[in-house]
Amino acid sequence: MKFVETFGVRVQDQKEEDETPYISTPISTSSTNQFDNNKTTTTDNDVANDGKSPIRVLGLDCEMVMTTVGSELARVTLIQFDEFVGPKDCAKTTVLLDCLVLPHNRIVDYVTKYSGITPNLLKPISTRIEQVQYALAGYLTPNDILVGHSLENDLKALHYIHPRVVDTSMVFSRTDKMRRFKFSLRHLSGLLLKRKIQGGSHCSEEDAQAALDLALLKAVLGDDLRKQFVTKSTTVFIGPNPWLEAHITNNPNAAHALSYDSPNDCKKAMLSWITGRRKAQLVWSKIVLKNDPDTTSGTDASLEIFKSMVTDIVEKLPSKCVLMVAIQGELQTAKDMFKRRGACRDSRSSVGWSSDNEETWKGLLESTRVGHVQWFSAAPNNIT
């Protein structure tokens, strides 16, 4: 790729089928050719020497859809910082660019849940990524500071390279052994800005504003801000091995994962982390109580075991500690039946799936959608 050769920048994860060229913010206002064969790299001096351009701070965010060649740009928003209002308030900004973009390749998944993009939104759109690139290259200067969250994803979607960026996923990165993993923009916005975002699908204007406000907050408060969101805490998950493997141990995290053989073992482990010398800030337990098919009192026996567990834990809860119990019945049965339903309805299967089976499945599905949640506080004699 000629851009890589010219600017000395390695573009990773670029599929051969994706032929959209990468472009860069012009090195100086006098530059007319980005592919000047006499210059192979962009240096800090090039940026610093462009004294004609003012320093502007801009927020950038993009939404993507999945196409036959991977993730492609579908919406881009660029906002410009105008005035700082307050540490937790939205800065005054001007929307410079907010447009939908039609990908060159066939869309296989609109990812509407996250992108907010639907077929109807893109149906009348004719704007292509090259037009967006041209607009950015015509407006941005090397002195401009682009702010975003996980900005590499947005710039890769835009096929664009800019010399000065602030990535809030790096600014607010972890400092412990899990520093490779990032805080989400939603988490940082809720914790530091006290602002709820991404309640439904993502909005690129909302996300660009949140990233910009987080960067400004860091600039104002400096290292004092880290104290607000970096805390040493311990999280413990206790449950059956299959559940731990599916949700905890096979995913990168710093949580403690403990399995158990019986409900009583689970109770002991919970109390140890709640009341012991080494306390956890969160203990999450999955307790599976199975009925004995050979007895008529299986349900009653399971309920008694469960009630005894909850009672013992509540009696020993320390002050400023609460217990939430969420009950959902027949979940595993529903999962097993769902797998069997899919296998039976396969055209290659010799085992049929009757209308009675379907009605049973629907009834079971509805019952699993109904649950019960109860909160318990520490027993009165445990509160001082």
Image: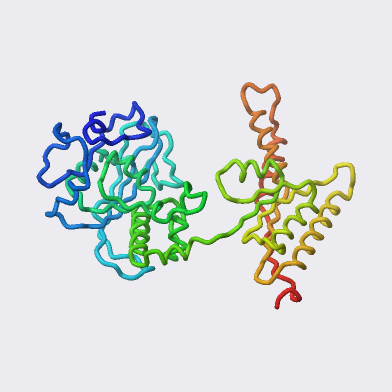
Residue 277 percent across, percent down from the top left? 70, 63
Q: Which residue lies at the image location 57% right of the left edge and 43% below the top edge?
A: 251
Q: Is residue 140 visible?
A: no
Q: How many marks?
A: 0
For residue 103, above or below residue 112: above
Which residue shows up at 62% across the image and 61% down it? 281
Q: Please tell me which residue lies in front, 52 or 380.
A: 52
Q: Residue at x 26, y 50 (%)?
A: 164
Please tell me which residue is depicted at 75% across the width and 53% down the height of the picture. 266
The reply to whether residue 380 is visible in this rendering is yes
The spot of residue 72 in percent (x, y) is: 35, 37
Q: Is residue 100 left or right of residue 235?
A: left
Q: Nearer the viewer, residue 285 or 224?
A: 224
Quarter holding residue 19? top left
Q: Considering only vertical position in the picture, is 86 above or below 171?
A: below
Q: Quadrant of the C terminus?
A: bottom right
User: What is the quadrant of residue 157 in the picture?
Assistant: top left
Residue 100 picture location, percent across and down: 30, 45
Which quadrant would the N terminus be assigned to in this image?
top left
Residue reaching furthest to the bottom: 384
Considering only vertical position in the picture, is 313 above or below 38?
below
Residue 351 in the image: above or below residue 90: above
Residue 303 position within the rendered picture, expressed as x and y whole percent measured from the top left: 81, 55
Q: Colour scheme in the image?
A: rainbow
**Which one is in front, 151 or 120?**
151
